Image: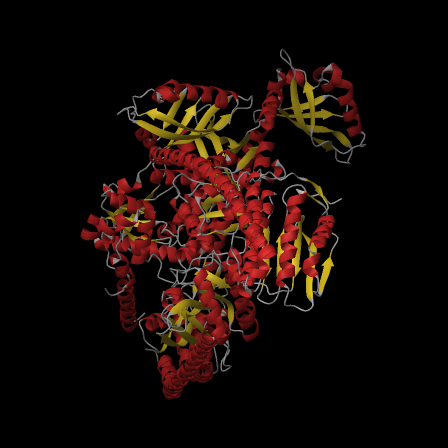
Amino acid sequence: MKLSNKLTLLIISLSLVPLIVLGNLAYENGRRTIERQTNEQLTSISALKVSEFNRWINDNKRSLIALAQRPLVREFTAVQSRSGITSQDPDFRSAQTAMLSDHLVPAVELEGGFLDFVIIGLDGQILTSTDRKLEGKIRSASNYYIEGMKETYVDTVTFNLSEAQYNLHISTPILDDSGSTIAVLAGHADLADMAAIITQKSGGTISENTYLVNAFNFFLTDPAGGEGYALTSSVYSQGVENCLAGNSGTAIYENYQGTLVLGAYRWLPDYGMCLLTEVDHIEAFSSIENYRGTMFSMIFVIAVIAIFLSLVFSRTISEPIRDLVEGSLEFGNGNLDHRINIKGKDEMSTLALSFNQMAASLRLITASRDELDKEIIERKNAEEHALKERDKAQQYLDVAGTIFVVIDADQKIRLINKSGCKMLGAEENEIIGQNWFKNYIPERNRADVRVVFNRLMAGEIEPIEYYENPVLVKDGPEKIIAWHNTLLFDGEDNIEGTLSSGEDISERRKAEGELSIKDFAFESSSSADSIGSNDGILTHANSTFARIWGYENVNEIIGKPILDFLADKEEANVIIESITKTGEWSGEYKALRKDGSTFIAMSYANAIKDAGGKQTALYSSVVDVTENKKAEKALRESEYLLRESQQIGKVGSYILEISNDIWISSRTLDEVFGIDEKFEKNIHGWLQLIHPDDKTMMEDYFATNILKNHESFNKEYRIQRNNDQQMRWMHGIGKLEIDASGNPIKMIGTIQDITDRKIAEIEIQVLNEELEQRVLVRTSQLEEANKELESFAYSVSHDLRAPLRAIDGFSKILQDEHSGNLPDDSQRYLDLIRNNTHDMDRLIDDLLAFSRLARQEPAKQPVSPNEIVKRVLEDLKGELEGRQVEMIIADLPDFQADPSLIKQVYLNLIDNAIKFSRGSDPARIEIGHLEQKGEQIYFIKDNGVGFDMLYVDKLFGVFQRLHKTEDFEGTGVGLATVLRIIRRHGGRIWAESEVDQGATFYFTLGGEIKND
Amino acid sequence: MNKTTKSLLFIFLGVLIISGCSSITPSQAVDEISVRLKWTHGVQFAGLYIAEEQGFFAEEGLSVTLKEGGLDFNELELVASGQDDFGILGAQSILGGRSDGVPVKAVATIFQISPSVYFSLAESGIERPEDFTGKRVMVFPNDKILVIMLNNMGVNMDQIIALPPSNDLASLYVGEEDVWTGYVTNQVVRARLDGYEINVIYPSDYGIFEYGDCIIATDDMIQNNPELTERFVRAAMQGWRYAIEHPDEAAAVTAQYSDVEDEVFLFESMKAQIPLIHNGEAPIGWMVLEDWQTMCEILLNPSHCESELELSDVFTLQILKAVYGIEE
């Protein structure tokens, strides 16, 4: 090691080593302290969050349980779970409405915490919900229902498909009085509250980040910088892994964003979740890192100073020696221009000076010889160069195809090169001195070309850079020459003539003429045609190409790499390689439009080759087939569902090509028909399968409904299965495809074996027919019996009357003629006998009238009920005597009815009203009508004793009485008669009442209603 | 460079090489397996494409060929006969196969709920099965799920007007049908992209559901090669998890396999299937005995499920437990 380096190292070591050791000790110490403090801080934040989270859950649980325990909630739930949701029971509906308006909705709106409540019945169906759309849905498989049946349960956060949102459900059983569960009350907790609790910062650090993760590594709340992560993103950091193993603690690890963090994790076994609280490593250790930075800068500054000092120190000692050594080495290598650096005036400097002088003397001697050699070589080179240049110039002039010609001001040819002579087909001596225009420009162009020349000569115009004109050739056709012209000047800047170089472009022009037709074909092609160079650059393209690829015009495209037009670069390279190898390629590829969209290109491409078979370019012709592809795809997708269902349902499918008279069938259909591949699969073959009894019908159906009327095939028919000749029922469905000219070309459809269903149907039909037959027999028997019964009732009534008259007559005689002889008791008995015979007589009258009604058709005619009521009240005058009755009679609209029968109705009903309002003072009877849904309803209302609605069914029966005869007289036939009359008119009658609150009888009369 | 520096450098490089080696899994022979899909390539298999593209299969030492299924294939047969190692198939087919004696069972389910739903235009006001009464409903032959769903809600099949399946959503738009049957990840997405507001009626809201695409393997495979099955299922589950987290990438990868070009449609379809795959209740792929019991009773018949079919022949949790490290 050199002296200077030793010195430098020594100084640096002495100054830096103690500094680094001490600094590091302090840093490590500080770092550990900070890590411990941060971990403590994170753990306490984490504990705080957990207790807040628990409190939130418990608050919600408590309020849910309180709701479920409200007596009215339990009562309403009991009503609902008894009747079930499909019930139209008014009790159910009213319980549901009351539950919602009085309990569930206020709990959502006023108390908060829950977004929705549902009540789930024992069978798992939602009975009531604040979100009415949920009612009726079945939740029997949900954990919160299953567990909620047993006890209060907190579900995990799950996604609900039909509600399209994440839910956390808390559920609790609703119990009846005996303590058994009658339903589950479930609340859908507000996850925003949960997220707010979790994500709210405690304020200690900027990067503090708390989030929940479920047991399957998925986020439950959005972490910082991760909006929308909840249940869509998973996390596998060290913290989460530790936690999901059921541990709680702290660690340093990379989090979900790959950031190094200090994190505290806590496993929450009750909810199957992890709570993580993290803070960025950088932020946590920023203060200690700052300290380290300061320490590093100090080390750096001290190192710089140390290095500087050591350098200065070592330089003064070692540098002059080094210079002397270097100098002597240079001189030894022959570099005599080198001079040793001389510093100061010490011994070293004197030595250096002597070296320098020696080198200078050597230099002088060698210099003169070298320069001479150099000059000789340079001259030789210049000479060779001049010779080469001259040869090159001669070659340029004689290059095939290029004419050089000089024309004097007097239009004569002064000079022409060999190519020029060859082109004009003459010797040089024949041409020189001739007039250019007269001899070599065709008559028709001569004047024009000469004018241009003259003007050039006169200096009126600038030399024409490029000019084309035809030239006459000895013994041959004219040639077209393209010229480049320059003016020649003499010594005094006068124009002396022109120097023109010309090129024979006759062939090119001719070819161009031909080419233009091909160009047109290329340009107007409806396919997208293009040509590319071997190195993959597009050189030609037509406008169809530009349009299909979405470019404005062709100019935008030319010069771009071919790869730019394909979506898949690898595929493109494969195609190009294939063309190069085989000379052509055809197929489909995914093409890339200017706007980045893609389409399917169907392409034919080949290599363009020169005469020698070498590839010069690539040609491609393309058609956009994306639409075809889409249609193909759509068809396949629809086949998907069809197929899935066929696999399961054993439904066969077929495609019938009508024009070719052939069908193809699925394997299932072959099984259904009992045929194999040898079967004659055409329309004739199908008809052969059909059962003889259905054959004519199906021939006719196919010819008329399908082929002629173009209907869809939808028919049930029988076949005789080919393999076992068993009769089977088929249901065939088919959709007909029609071509543009309206001819059916194809039918696609399915055929299902419906024999089992058919057999069941036929059984049902037979049963139904039997049943109908039996009903008919029973009906006629019943009618017979009814008639007999009526005639019996009539004759009984008639025959009863005769003895009754006798009893009454003889009793009257006894009273009139023998009253004097009879004791008082006997007289009273006679009175009773007579009263009872009158009662019985009235009863017989009523029964007669009642039975008559059965036989007699009502003779309908327009009737004024006002008139009828008036007459009835007239008849009932006797009943009203001595009574305080307030009669309210409305103006009643007319109707169609039998007047005598309808009078009976009013008579009976008003009579009843008077009778049963006897105890009320004042009695009040209202005779009126009302209109409901276009129907006239007539009513008679009283404020009498009324009846219990429980017995309303018995009201209209014969001999049915709701009151004791002692209280209210009557035969018990009146309302039965009224019912029968109203029914005979096609109307309805019903009553409403409450005990001691009066009764109202309503009736309608069916049929035409006349209002005028 | 002096000797000391050189030797230091060697040591340093040595450490690098050793530590580098230790991070590479010991090389194992790559197993070639083939998987038979239940249909042509599409977004319903996105997780498998992801597993391939992200190298999850390769990490498990698998070289996987994904083969299309469809109308021309009997996927159950292909897996049962060993021509394909694994397959993707619906619960109904697995139950049907097992009751016919095919020795194949489910080892995981991708779709916790089949994407097959009923849907209507929102303007029709049809929101629930009861609303089907008197309406024109597209009915696939033998759609047991429809019959049971309606029955659960007190509606009989003869109360609806059943129409044969149609190919063209336009017939729903113009009102030829009132209710359609389709995939919530396909026809429903398409109709919404076409600008229609759609009401979706999920059978799972009305007491019926079906596991959609299950991963199937033969009894023989599960018994004799559980480790291979486990590696495949683990990579597939990882693929699905990645697809859920990156629906945009899943759509882009699907576009490479499928001939559906429309990435907007693929993206929406991918998003629509996420809750069918993972809804926070269980790990991805998980299956539940009670669910299979219910499906068996609904989709086959109850007596059959009790007496003739062992549910342990229909599915097994053995593989999933191993994949997720869940103790027996």
Q: What residue occupies the far top of the structure in this picture?
A: A475
- Tell me: residue A242, above or below residue A135: below
Identified at 57% across, 59% down, the residue is: A831
Identified at 78% across, 19% down, the residue is: A447
Q: Quadrant of residue A440?
A: top right
Q: Quadrant of residue A1001?
A: bottom right
| Visible residue check, residue A576 | no
At which x and y percent is residue A583?
Answer: 42, 28
Return the residue nearer the eye: B19 or A234: A234
Return the residue nearer the eye: A12 or A374: A12
Return the residue nearer the eye: B273 or A776: A776
Q: What residue occupies the far left of the structure in this picture?
A: B224
Q: Quadrant of the N terminus of chain A?
A: bottom left
The colour scheme used here is secondary structure
* Total marks placed: 0
At which x and y percent is residue A773?
Answer: 41, 33
Return the residue nearer the eye: A607 or A409: A607
| Visible residue check, residue A114 | yes
Q: Quadrant of the C terminus of chain A?
A: top right
At which x and y percent is residue A815?
Answer: 59, 57
At which x and y percent is residue A797?
Answer: 52, 45
